[in-house]
Amino acid sequence: MSLSGNLKTVSFPDILQLLATGKKTGVLECKTATRQKEVAFKDGNIIFASSVNSSEDLLGNMLLKRGRISKVDLERAIQLHKQTGRQLGTTLIDMGLFDKGEIGECLKLQIEEIVYNLFSWQEGDFNFHEGSAPKNAPFLIELNTMNVLMEGTRRVDEWLEIQKVLPADDVLFRLARSPKVNREELTISLDEFRLLSIINGDRTLPDLINLSPMGEFVTCRALYRLIINNLVEVAGTKEDSVEEQQENEEEAVLRIIFKLYSNCFYQVRLRVDEAVGENNTRYPVFASQYRSGLLTFFPGVDPHSELMPSFEKFIASVRAIPSPIRHYTLLGSLEKMLSEQLIYVYRLLGLGVFRDTVTGVKKEIAEPLATRRELVKRYRIEENFYGTVKRADKTVKMLRGSK
């Protein structure tokens, strides 16, 4: 079955209905210039969903916000996940922190948030890959697509009313000092009660969404009801000075990382092209597996050429990741990509080109590492980089020893 087009002409609900009634198996890919989501189906039911560059696709963040895991345990799990290459959900189970049922319930909520978000898309290309299976899925959760379709449609209608009440993103909220309720008894939902517990007069709507364990739509709906019931009121607007200072520091760190790894991957590609010629397709085919998510911003082109991706788009994509795991997510992906590419150079071209590539990479990162040394040290950028190179070299030595 060939199904592709743009959401301007075929709506996402119509696509869901078609796949459900046709009992299709495969992966539906929806993407714009800045967003990409995939929804996997089996016999018409939804079994998995993933979202590139979005906080809703981060299992660790969901568990952290729900108070189900400590920051220390999450960081330990992420480190182990990076070392072993196993999925985070599987790693958490292996560590004895959760059982499969608990991870499954969180994955179910995660999948629902990703799919429901697609109901709001008014444009974007879609393509259904029939027979394809989802990649990097720890295990699959089966959802009735028609039930999801009905709930998603209801949310879209409700969202239109919610948006009429919610103010701008810089507005702070606090509990009403003199609640004006029309009834002697007021019943609030569990979602509203949860939201009340994190409203303190210093948080905006984006802050509440980021802290809330309930997802964007449920959080906005709860705030909408609290506002119209006069239980929450505006407390002014957020001062930008502290936030801007933090963003400026983060931007400086991301600029160092962007330049460092752009130089690295360009040097890897350059050494391979010099050895096999630009017309040899073996390396480009290998490198194509990294053309997704944050890694699309590191295509291995000359950092000074017009082909180099935009730093502004890169930083926007990184900031879509929740701050508690933003640094681990970004560096973990880049370190894995660099290590795998260096090892591939050895497998393809041998020890001499591998060593020449490592030398070239080390020379090219000197300049970015010399920028803002205090930040480089604090965020362990240099330490992580050289650790990655050492791990690749260790793997090569093992491969040589096994021959």
Image (cartoon, grey):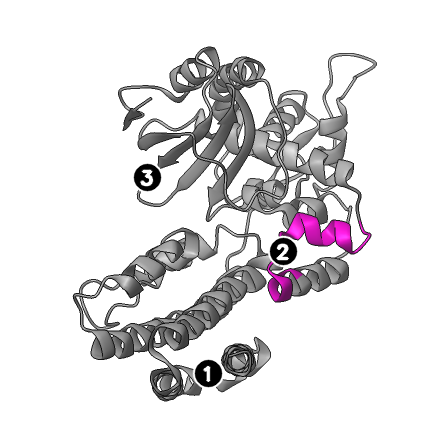
Element on which disc 1 rests: loop
Give the mark nearer the N terminus: 1 vs 2: 2
Q: Is residue 277 visible?
A: yes
- Residue that numbered label 1 is attached to: 372
Give the mark nearer the N terminus: 3 vs 2: 3
As shown in the figure, which amino acid type bears the numbered disc 2? Arg
Front-most of residues 346 and 255: 346
Query: Exactly how many numbered labels are in the figure?
Result: 3
Does the magenta stretch mainly form a helix, a strand or a loop? helix
Specify the segment rendered in magenta.
Answer: 81-97
Q: Position of residue 226 (x, y in %)?
A: 67, 26
- Mark carried by residue 86: 2
- Residue that numbered label 3 is attached to: 32
Q: Disc 1 or disc 2, which is closer to the eye? A: 2
Element on which disc 2 rests: loop
As shown in the figure, which amino acid type bears the numbered disc 1? Arg
- Above or below: residue 266 compared with residue 80: below
The N terminus: image quadrant: top left
Q: Residue at x 48, y 50 (%)?
A: 320
Q: Position of residue 206 (x, y in %)?
A: 55, 43
Front-most of residues 118 and 353: 353
Element on which disc 3 rests: loop
Give the mark nearer the N terminus: 3 vs 1: 3
Q: Is residue 90 magenta?
A: yes
Q: Report the side of 8 relative to 229 (left or right).
A: left
Front-most of residues 99 and 160: 99
**How far apart are the two marked residues, 1 and 2, measured between alpha carbons?**
34 Å
Determine crowd level at label 2: few under 14, some 14-19, many 20+ residues with C-alpha closer than 10 A: some
As shown in the figure, which amino acid type bears the numbered disc 3? Thr
